[in-house]
Image: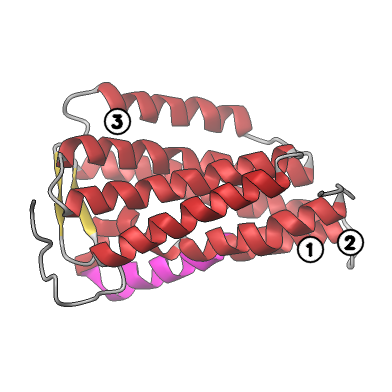
């Protein structure tokens, strides 16, 4: 068994934290699905938590030295679906599925690319506190447009719908918390990207590390508020 690098130091995204985050996110996914599966929103939120947890598990396995290429593919497939799943959650609240079909089509193309194209990912390295995935810079730029574009689209869609709602609307409150959820990982990642250039090759790893905040918001605030807004009875 491969020993983790720098195993005596606990970094904010160390393998131990990756494993803990995976366990938390999968536990939250089970909780959300069992309690809120009566709504499509609850089921989709649970699937988002599974995707987040799957990426953390992939990172942990990479740092453990277990088939880096396979787990790199698993991790990228998981996070590739997250922006469009987030937009789907927003559309369930706003009832405005703008660009959702385009998002699904783009995500499927990338999923097929990561899963089956031999040179899509050439491996990954465990940096001790984050994962650096090996792919061409040109590819990362193109993928970044998709990823950040659909994350920002989710925020824009929420803001657009909020403008049409009464100030104290319960639906407005759900959308506000979705925006907070987006910013909980996009903001810190943007700050790290600007202030710590050495971490730019580990954007996916660091951003998904911060996304545990979104996971907690989904399970304990956003999904419960959505169900109360729609007067869904939970046994």
Image colouring: secondary structure
Q: Magenta span has 194?
A: yes
Q: Residue placed at 24% from the left, 41% from the top?
A: 72
Task: Name the quadrant containing residue 181.
Answer: bottom right
Q: Main secondary structure of the magenta part?
A: helix
Sequence order check, earlier mark of 3 and 1: 3
- Picture coordinates of residue 11, whole percent (x, y): 25, 74
- Picture coordinates of residue 128, whole percent (x, y): 17, 65
Q: Secondary structure at mark 2?
A: loop
Give the residue at mark 1.
173
Q: Residue placed at 39% from the left, 45% from the top?
A: 54
| Label 1: how many Cα within 10 Å (few below 14, some 14–19, many 20+) | some
| Label 2: how many Cα within 10 Å (few below 14, some 14–19, many 20+) | few
**Side (left or right) of 199 relative to 82:** left
Give the residue at mark 3.
114
**Side (left or right) of 215 relative to 4:** right
Q: Is residue 48 visible?
A: yes
Sequence order check, earlier mark of 2 and 3: 3
Q: Is residue 150 visible?
A: no
Give yes or no for contact between labels 1 and 2 (Cβ–Cβ under 8 Å): yes
Give yes or no for contact between labels 3 and 1 (Cβ–Cβ under 8 Å): no
The residue lying toward the viewer, choosing from 162 and 50, is 50
Task: Work out how far the residue at label 1 is from the one at label 2, CA to CA, in angstroms.
Answer: 7 Å
- Picture coordinates of residue 42, whole percent (x, y): 69, 44
The residue lying toward the viewer, choosing from 52 and 234, is 234
Q: Secondary structure at mark 3?
A: helix
Q: Which residues are magenta?
A: 182-197
Task: Name the quadrant containing residue 17.
Answer: bottom left
Which numbered dot is residue 169? 2
Task: Work out how far the residue at label 2 is from the one at label 3, CA to CA, in angstroms.
Answer: 41 Å
Task: Work out how far the residue at label 3 is from the one at label 1, CA to CA, in angstroms.
Answer: 36 Å
């Amino acid at each position: 068994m491969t020993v983790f690098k720098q195993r005596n130091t606990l970094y904010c995204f160390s393998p131990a934290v990756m494993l803990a985050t995976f366990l938390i996110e999968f536990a939250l996914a089970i909780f959300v699905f069992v309690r809120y599966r009566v709504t499509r929103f609850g089921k989709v939120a649970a699937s988002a938590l599974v995707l987040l947890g799957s990426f953390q598990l992939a990172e942990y396995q990479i740092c453990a030295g277990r088939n880096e290429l396979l787990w790199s593919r698993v991790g990228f497939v998981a996070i590739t679906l997250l922006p469009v799943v987030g937009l789907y959650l927003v559309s369930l609240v706003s009832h405005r599925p703008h660009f959702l079909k385009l998002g699904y089509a783009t995500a499927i193309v990338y999923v097929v690319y990561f899963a089956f194209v031999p040179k899509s990912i050439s491996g990954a390295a465990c940096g001790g506190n984050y994962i650096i995935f090996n792919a061409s810079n040109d590819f990362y730029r193109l993928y970044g447009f998709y990823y950040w574009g659909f994350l920002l689209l989710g925020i824009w869609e929420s803001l657009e719908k909020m403008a049409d709602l009464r100030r104290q609307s319960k639906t407005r409150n759900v959308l506000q918390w979705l925006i907070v959820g987006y910013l909980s990982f996009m903001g810190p990642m943007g700050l790290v990207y600007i202030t710590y250039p050495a971490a730019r090759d580990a954007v996916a790893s660091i951003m998904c590390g911060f996304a545990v905040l979104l996971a907690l918001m989904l399970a304990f605030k956003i999904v419960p508020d959505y169900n109360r807004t729609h007067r869904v009875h939970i046994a």
